[in-house]
Amino acid sequence: MINFGIIGTGWITTSFVAGAHATGRWSLGAVYSRKADSAKHFASKYDQPIGIHTTLESLTANDNISAVYIASPNSLHFAQAKQILSAGKHVILEKPATSTSQELDTLFKIAKEKGVFLIEAYRHLHERNFKILQSALPRLGPIYGASITYGQYSSRYDKVLQGEVPNIFSLEYSGGALVDLGVYCVSAAVALFGEPEQAVYHPVIISTGADGGGFVLLKYVTFSVSLNFSKIYNSNAPTEVYGEKGTLQTPTVTDIEEVRFWDPKVKESMESLGQGKEHLNLMEEAQEFARIIQEKDYEAARKWERVSRGVIKVTEKVRKENGLLFPVEKEAQ
């Protein structure tokens, strides 16, 4: 059993704890929040002893905790993860792991020096239907291209329209659509096809100065992948991979309900390959993270590290090309 702590008390943390507990391999033992009341309120949901921490120092000093799940605002990820890793504890870090590739390099270096794992939580890449999509790629023969979509209107955009600046739409908090929903699309492409040779971003810049959505074109040696993502409009377009021998299709890029294969020789119907999605949508990643930690599967950890590095290589490049700079990058200029 892995006794773990959490940083961040939002819905995603609640979902992760539910998924982690369902695996039978994790046990929540500590909650961190700058406000004791927030930590106590979160801990009160669970019928087990849970330590309350209002400083990272007290959390890292908790010898009963061997891993920490971090789901705080993006701009806080690096400093918090650095402190936790330096204390010799494993870190599961919500996407996007860090604001810059340099920060990510530093965290992986510390993790290796301390002999602990740092894993970025791309939950959709661990879904069984995503794995079915991945394993079905050879059926396509030569790949001609792909389109990956995640457009979901955010209620917090209503606040932007009213003149406010929510964290997720603030560059000061390392926010924006690319690093929020866009990374689902980028990470799916990197997991399916590897790192692209080129990447170009055409963002929609909103009043906060951040990107509300946009299109990224990834160029591979023999094909291209189009990414469409947004927090300011909805899209019901499917995610598709096109090949010489057929097309693979999913309704979404995350929480995938089904995977279908279209054979151009049959045409009348599409073959269903999916198995139905897991009702706890973070259980699959929690299961794999526990396995990596408990079995000390460094090869699997390196695979996910390559995905994380591939994703931030793309997002950092296209952000900078569009002047979407975070505070840490402005300070370095």
Image: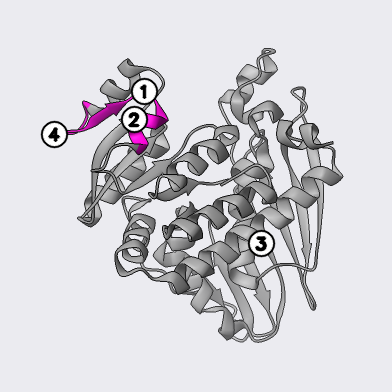
Task: Find the distance from the CA under tag 1 to the CA under tag 2.
Answer: 8 Å
Query: In this view of the protein, can residue 148 be seen by the observer?
Result: no
Residue 35 sits in quarter:
top left
Of the numbered discs 4 and 3, the one sitting upstream in the chain is 4
Task: Find the distance from the CA under tag 3 to the CA under tag 2.
Answer: 34 Å
> For residue 54, which numbered disc appears in the image?
1
Circle 3 or circle 1, nearest the eye? 1
Q: Which amino acid does label 2 sit on?
A: Ser
**Nearer the observer, 220 or 29:** 29
Task: Find the distance from the CA under tag 2 to the CA under tag 4.
Answer: 22 Å
Q: Which amino acid does label 1 sit on?
A: Thr
Residue 49: say if magenta: yes
* Residue 314: percent from left, percent from top: 73, 56
Q: Bounds of the magenta span?
A: 44-60
Task: Find the distance from the CA under tag 4 to the CA under tag 1.
Answer: 21 Å
Of the numbered discs 3 and 2, the one sitting upstream in the chain is 2
Query: In this view of the protein, can residue 203 be seen by the observer?
Result: yes
Q: How crowded is mark 1: few (under 14 residues within 10 Å), some or many (20 or more)?
A: some
Q: Mark 3 points at which residue?
A: 310
